Every structure is written in structure tokens, then in C-alpha cells.
Amino acid sequence: MYELKKYGIIPVSPSVLSEALADYHSVKDKISSLERSGDLIRLRNGLYVVSNKITEQNFSLELIANQLYGPSYVSFEAALSYYGLIPERVYLVKSATPKRAKSYQTPLGVFEYIRVPQHYYPIGVRSVLVNNTYAFMMASPEKAFCDQIISTAGLRIQSLTAMHRYIEDDMRMDTGLMQSWDLSIIEACIEYGPKKNDLLFLLKYLKNE
């Protein structure tokens, strides 16, 4: 299926697929047939990705997360794992969005979107370019951890000791990688985000390291 292979791992809409499948009498029927055969994977209504047995490339769950629901950026444990800050592999891809919370269950995994305040949303968000072929939006390490703190229900950090315990025992963070963090991102999160006291203890923790 050369006409599909050219799309690589980029999620595509039926209108884009119709260009590659223009020679078929019914593009809609052909898309359904390709889905049944496993050559196309439906992520949600109106969005597909070509099977890796055709592209011979690994899927980018981060890129898919961006395309499934937006505006959004990959964050929380998914970003922390990507940066090597936590030891666990993450199978639930969490993203932040200024829109309402949402969740998608797809053949490639579960994608969850957590609402954050509008003015807080753009702080510390970067574009990650992979192999000069595609890019996705992801939180910086600092923003991902701030997102993790503000979104964790029931978490209240009221001392430096509690922050130390949360970072090293609960999250098992690689504290060596945290030493080069940009504190201005955390300061901006304190200004525009919720849980200001919790984030203040994060700032104090980093300044003491």
C-alpha cells in the first residue's frame, strides 16, 4: 500500500486519505476496508493512522496525543518519563488542555486530557522535533512536574520535608536531572496556576539543592 506508506506515522483525516485513494470508486468504502484489514487504525471519528506493518516505523504516542484533541500538549507522567525523570514506563498518555477534560480509548492506548487554567496553559511548552521529520508539543520538565502537582487530587504539600518526600519517595524522580531546571518557569506557574503554596515549596526545594 504505497499510497498509504507516504503518510508515515502522521495521523490523517478522511479528506487527506481521499487524495491517496482517489482512484477507488468509493473512498469511504475503501477506508472501511483498510480499517478491517488492519492497514488503517481508527483513533477516533475522522482521524486515522497507518499501521506500522506498512510504514515500518514506530508510532509516536506523543504526536497522536496532540492530534487527537487540541489545543493540548503532552505532560504529567508521560512527559516526565520521556525526559527520563521517573523510572516507570507510562502507558496512559496524559496531556494538558485549556478546554474541557476528555479521554480517548484507542487501539494504541488511552489518551487523557486534563484541563488547566487558560493563562497557565502556555507556560513552559515546547516543540519537540524528532529526526527532522515530525514534531509535537510537550511540557518542559519543569512544567510537566508543576502540572503533576496541581492535577493530583488530594495532594497538599505543606512543608519542605513533604516536598522532599513527594519528589524522592513517591515520584522517585532523578534529582540529578532537576539541578539544571529553569526556575523562571516554576515562578510563572506559581503566578498563574493553582496550588501556589505547593509550587512555592517546589521552588524552595530546588533552590536548596
Image (cartoon, helix red, strand yellow):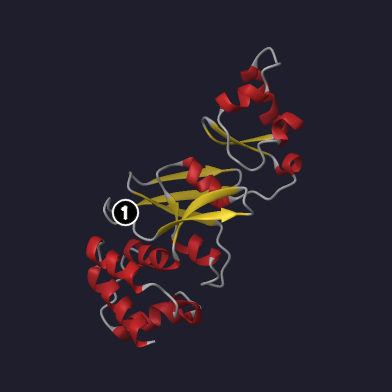
Q: 182 or 99, which is in the foreground?
A: 182
Rendered image quadrant of residue 76: bottom left
Quadrant assignment for the N terminus: top right
Number of numbered discs visible in the structure rendering: 1
Q: Residue at x 50, y 60 (%)?
A: 78
Q: Residue at x 28, y 65 (%)?
A: 188
Q: Is residue 164 visible?
A: yes
Q: Residue at x 28, y 73 (%)?
A: 198
Q: 200 or 153, which is in the foreground?
A: 200
Tell me if mark 1 has few (under 14), some (14-19) or many (20+) residues whose alpha carbon lies within 10 angstroms of its own.
many
Q: Which percent across, then down, holds residue 75?
A: 44, 58
Quadrant assignment for the C terminus: bottom left
Q: Which percent across, then down, holds residue 120?
A: 29, 57
Is the residue 130 above or below the residue 83 in the image?
above
Q: 147 or 102, which is in the foreground?
A: 147
| Residue with the mark numbered 1 | 116
Q: Which percent across, then down, holds residue 37?
A: 73, 31
Q: Which percent across, then down, holds residue 178?
A: 45, 77
Left-right relation of 51 to 197: right
Q: Residue at x 26, y 75 (%)?
A: 200
Left-right relation of 124 to 191: right
Q: Is residue 1 visible?
A: no
Identity of the residue furthest to the top in this view: 25
Left-right relation of 28 to 154: right
